[in-house]
Image (cartoon, rainbow, N blue to C red):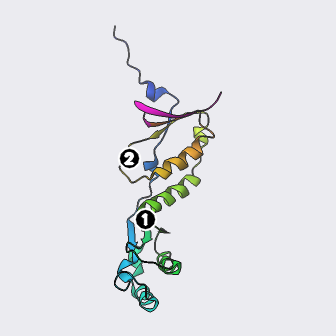
Amino acid sequence: MAEEIVNRVATSKLKTFDLEEIYPDGKRVLFDIKDWLFQEIILKETDFRAFVKNHDWSQYKNTFVAITCSADAIIPSWAFMLVAAELTPFANKVVIGNLELLETVLYQELLEFIDFRDFTDAPVIIKGCANKPIPNAAYAFLIGKLQPIAKSIMFGEACSTVPLYKAKK
């Protein structure tokens, strides 16, 4: 008589947290103000304000925007703030920085609103493989939320995990 095969992973108390599952859908935009600079190096306030005034900001509706300047220029803070002020009514989120910073901020905010009670005293696996751009900082934020409550934390997949933390008994 053949022995029944038991899926021990499916019957274990392991809890999996997949950061990809909370990834907010929506277009990401890197808004580069370089093209609004004189010779891509000098910000002329009058010209810059004219570009801002005449730009169609509605095209950024429901997007996530990172404002940057890829030119090697000294840009005053107010210039980034002026662009952010125009984007804010349309975009879901606006940051001043690159796309990685944008993703970092999104994850930091998302993790603040998650109820982690289901992970209390549980062995937790933080899913490792992702098809979406999950910044390393998001994993650190998640560790900060899980470590005070989880029994243990591992990284990877149930079939092959890397241990990260085990609560003291």
Crowding at label 1, few (<14), some or many (≥20) Cα neighbours within 10 Å? Answer: some
Examine the structure image and report whether residue 166 is included in the region drawn in magenta: yes
Give the answer, above or below, for where 55 lies relative to 63: below
The disc placed on residue 123 is none
Alpha-carbon span between mark 2 and mark 1: 20 Å
Residue 58: image x %, image y %?
41, 78
Q: Give the prevailing secondary structure in the magenta stretch.
A: strand
State the residue at coordinates (53%, 30%).
13
Q: Which residue is mark 2?
A: 130
Q: Quadrant of the C terminus?
A: top right
The residue positioned 45% from the left and 59% from the top of the image is 103
Q: Position of residue 95 (x, y in %)?
A: 49, 68
Is tag 2's residue or tag 1's residue first in the polypeptide sequence?
Answer: 1
Q: Nearer the viewer, residue 108 or 35?
A: 35
Write the start and end of the magenta stretch as one range.
156-169
Specify the quadrant of the image occupied by residue 6.
top left
Q: In x, y percent, where is residue 114?
A: 57, 50
Q: Amino acid at mark 1?
A: Asn
x and y percentages locating residue 109 in the rendered image:
55, 58
Q: Residues within 10 Å of mark 2 (few under 14, many from 20)?
A: few
Residue 98's disc number: 1
| Relative vertical location of residue 83 with respect to residue 135 in this rendering, above or below | below
Look at the image and tell me in which quarter the N terminus lies.
top left
Q: Quadrant of residue 65?
A: bottom left
* Above or below, comparing residue 142 to residue 89 in the picture: above
- Please state which of residues 158 and 62 is positioned toward the viewer in this rendering: 158
At 49% from the left and 51% from the top, the residue drawn is: 138
The kind of residue on which mark 2 rests is Ala
